[in-house]
Image: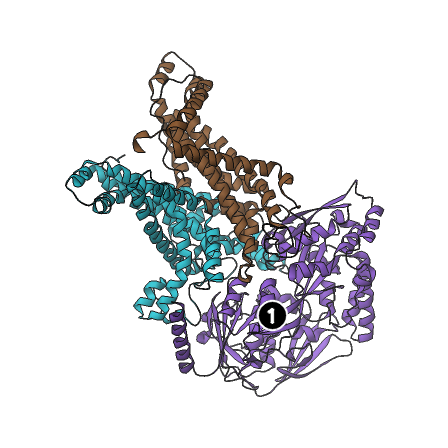
Chain colours: A cyan, B brown, C purple
Amino acid sequence: MKNLLRYALTRILLTIPMLWILLTLVFVVLRIMPGDPVSAMLGGHAPERVIEQKKEELGLNRPILAQYFDYLGDLARLDLGNSMIYNQKVSQPLLQKLPATLELTMVGMAFTMLIGIPLGAYAASRRRTGRDFSIRLFGNVAYCIPVFWMGLMLQLVFGIWLDLLPIAGRTGPRVFVKDFQNTGFYLLDTLLAGQWASFADVALHLLLPSLTLGIVLSGIFIRLTRANMLDTLKADYVLAARARGIPERRVVYGHALKNAFIPVLTMLGLQFAALLAGAILTETTFSWPGMGRLLVERIYLRDYPTIQGVIVVFAFFVSLVSLAVDLIYALIDPRVRY
Amino acid sequence: MASPMTPPKAAGTRFSVAGGLARLLARFSAAHRKYGVEWWILITGAALILFAIYMASFPATLARYDPLDQEAGPQMATPSRAHPMGTDNLSRDVLSRMIHGSRTILGVAFAAAILSSLIGIPLGLLSGFAGGPLDRVLSLVMDSIYSFPGLILAIAFAAMLGPGVVNITLSVAVIYIPTYFRLVRGQTLSIKEELYVEAARAIGAPRRTILGRYIFPNVIATVVVVFSLNIADAIMTEAALSYIGLGLPAGIPDWGMDLSMGKKFLPSGVWWMITFPGAMISLLALGFTMLGEGLSEILNPRLLEK
Amino acid sequence: MKRLLLILALVILAAGVVVGAGKTIVYGTTEKMTNLDPAEAYDFHTWEIFYNVYQGLLNYTPGTTQIVPGMAESYSANPAGDEFTFKLRKGVKFTDGSPFNAQAVKWSIERVMTLAGQPSWLVTDYVDSVSVVDDYTVKFKLKFPCAYFHTVVATPPYYPVSPNIYPADKIIWDPAEMAGGQLVGLGAYKLVSFKRDEEVILETNPSYWGKKPAVDRVVIRYYADATTLRLALEKGEVDIAFKTLNPSDIKDLAANKKYTTYKLPGPQIRYLCFETSESVFQNKLLRRAVAALINRPDIIQKVYLGQNSPLYSMVPNGMIYHSDDFKTVMGDGNVALADKLLAQAGFSAAKPFQFDLWYTPSHYGDPEVNMAEVLKVQLEKSKAIKVTLQSAEWAAYKEKWKHKEMPVFFLGWYPDYLDPDNYTAAFAGTSGSAGMGIYFSNPDWDALFVKEQSNADPKVRESVFKEIQKRWTDEVPTAPIWQGDLYVFTKPSVKGIKIGPTLQFLYSELSMQ
């Protein structure tokens, strides 16, 4: 127990320098961007003195090191600064769009597991047969399909040709968000407000984008589940269960899968980074009002504080998830220690 | 990215790169008999790649039209005998654009992979071999970057540097350096402990020799596998950057850009402008993945686990 | 499943119709509203909202370029042309009850001058001082005699705002910052809800002095891109779709009988700019050669599916004193002329003229990159030219032109005020030209500009502008390409769409059947 505590503490402390490195990297990358953002923002007719004044206001005339410490200081106080293009705090659009991205990511993750784990388990149970190979092939191919292309193809088939599902946005005609706006997670909000029709609408809008994410990332889960299942299926207790005459299906899904599940869960955490990257591309394709699309839009506008803010939030989430995963893993696997 | 790599278990003594290669070839022929399916996966992957390389090197032999020719046919025509992949909104032949576009994407992916390996491998060797505070600091930095979604970093770099082939290559290369670093460092750490390395040190072999003659050749095998998988990933990243609009300026056929242009015509029912570029990206990435996976199975036999 | 959804949708729709009192129109656009202050906003969409929420001293007849009285019943200029006196409408109040009078006008103008926002030059470049003659008479003293000042006064920076509601020293970005949390001016509507990049809601203004509009509520919904807007229209989510749809979307929607299509002449022009002071284009022969190779109908057909009009002068089609000089002098795709000029400059197929052609990928909409690609092919029809395409996002693009890094680049223009001066002096007058990255400077031209600016006699102005347009084909500081048509798509039940080249879209003219 003491060992575990020591590991946990070390790991948590390690998150700080890792986060700091990422934040510094972000700062460095963004400060070297070409194009004076202030004169770009103020438009062609702005007189020099106004540009200079704005630069003073934003602290861009100070030496780069001073700006760096300002930046770190602000972050420590959870102040993400103000947008350069619109007069709003960076946190405003961020907080507004964060739930959209998280909802998409979580439902996407759910699909990944729903597709990947059963398929992987099935492949393991039928190893080296035609079905095993076709499932593995599917996994490989799915992984190689660019997530935005998968999104476009799904839009084409289900949105344009079959005209069954919506292909853009989070809500549809005449569904007014302010009627149920609460946490920002629309699936939850519509249920809380008791609006079944809106719930259906929101769910349908969520279907294609999260399915896109789910299919593309399922490849890894198929492979991992399969590998872990193969190991588990060789274990003694499985042999014993089989000897006792328990039906194969129960052996595979009831016993083996449960034990193979845990490393898969931790894999989920590690795939979080890939999910976020995929979410950015999916949001662009489905006009999903999330942080990914915010990032892309603000890059065109050279709105550095917002760009910085989005990346910082991503970095924070990734570090958090990675920390959680390592801790859970340590809890389960006593071999992992510092 | 790749599945976790394990160092070769059945390690005999390997004293030269030539010997190592010879062993590789021996393994290959043995592999053919032992691994039916994996062998075929490797071959398919290799075939796809060779074809892609040919396509990228000699596009004119395959493409009937100039990819920039805006009078190749009718505007936005559906696929037909004359234009097997249809024409785009500027009346350019899509098939020709696909063929010529392979050069861009393959070129960027290769260059990025080479660049990141050239930086990541020496750093990994150094870090693993030297150990100590240098190792700890470098590992920390590399781990931080590795855990972060690579695409976001690439986007930030590409946005900062602006459009252009060199800039895109740099943006893509940056995110794979930690991959090579970690791999090589891990390998170095384990090989460092091997008996023959200790022996070499005992007889006073200079560090350079140990690194160059013992550690490096053993690392090569896994690096080759990762290199192939890396190119697959780089292809997808380059396509993603072009899709978002951070790629190359117009005038160079690029699959990602064609996808993003084709997207605008989707509601009009124009499916061929997006189907083919995406399929090409997938195929190419698949080729490199299959090659990598196939190589991995053969070089790192896991008889018991299969 | 689909049928179930349809039934659900119908039920919701029916419920909405029963519950919602009064007429509501939903208007979809891909534009963005920037901020809510006439002293700062400098984009057409925000100005469009201002046309409906505020009122100027002078207005335009809806759908035309004819100036009519607004908050000012009449105006007059002194013989020298540098003093304008406006007689204001009496008996109008702002929403908080404070009277609309000359003091309010003076206060508003001085506020714009002090705050020095983006459009403030429209005031500070022209107006020297504002004075109150009496409660309902206000006098503008100009810095120089200006023949077209009345068109300038019709722009939003001149709109009177209430001194009680607007802070004198701060720009308003959000209605929440104002007393009462709502935006009210002297116009037919007031802004009641503002969710940036999502939705803006306007309702009729009870204190409006004019006729009450037929539509009680206008909901403006913002869409991320053209495709989403098109889909929204097709799914019935919006009643009006305006700005900006892709050419293929326009083509499909225009062919669809389910929607009413409005094609209106627009004020936007697109053109090529040359950096004339230090780049390879210092030599006007080369500028003329490039201009001669432009094939406008080809660009319009290929890239815009025929949806815009070719432009042969910087002064747009339909504007006073317009003359198709580029057509008569060069025509389209004139390879012979170009080759001749290039040869004179010392270039040939063996030694081609190489340069970078710049464009900006997203600021002007998605087809921009296609236009660059098509122009490149057109230019290279002359074997003595080799073009490399380069691009930069808008912010970097502006920087580059300021620093003379782009020898030739695409630009677009929406007019500030509707007078040929705004389309010409801004590019070829010494000060304006530098601001646009063209750096053209010719004292003869400057003299001509001063002449047309200060002389109100239409005959004098006409001769000056005809001369300028003619000279333009010789010096070619810019080469005009096309003029934009505006497309509005509505459900058949919507009537009253009157949008003129001023881009004034008055919601008060709308009605639903």
Q: Is residue B95 left or right of residue B114?
A: right
Q: Please give the residue where the numbered disc 1 appears in the rendered image.
A: C254
User: Is residue A88 shown to the viewer in this render?
Assistant: no
- In this view, the residue in front, C200 or C120, is C200
C269 and C407: which is toward the camera: C269
Outermost residue toward the top in this view:
B203
Q: Is residue A154 left or right of residue A329?
A: right
Q: Amino acid at mark 1?
A: Ala
Quadrant where the image shows the C terminus of chain A: top left
Q: Residues within 10 Å of mark 1 (few under 14, many from 20)?
A: some
- Where does the image place residue C336, in percent across and percent down from the top left? 82, 52
Whether residue A69 can be seen here: yes
For this orientation, the residue located farthest to the bottom is C91
- Above or below — where is A66 with respect to C38? above
- Quadrant of the frame with the N terminus of chain A: top left
C130 vs A303: above or below = below
Q: Residue C151 appears in which quarter of the rendering?
A: bottom right
In the displayed structure, C144 sits above or below C342; it is below
Q: The residue marked by circle 1 belongs to what chain?
A: C
How far across and how far down the image is residue C394, in percent? 60, 55
Find residue B172 and report its horizontal and vertical position in percent. 51, 41
Q: What percent of the width, then of the height, locates residue C228?
A: 51, 63
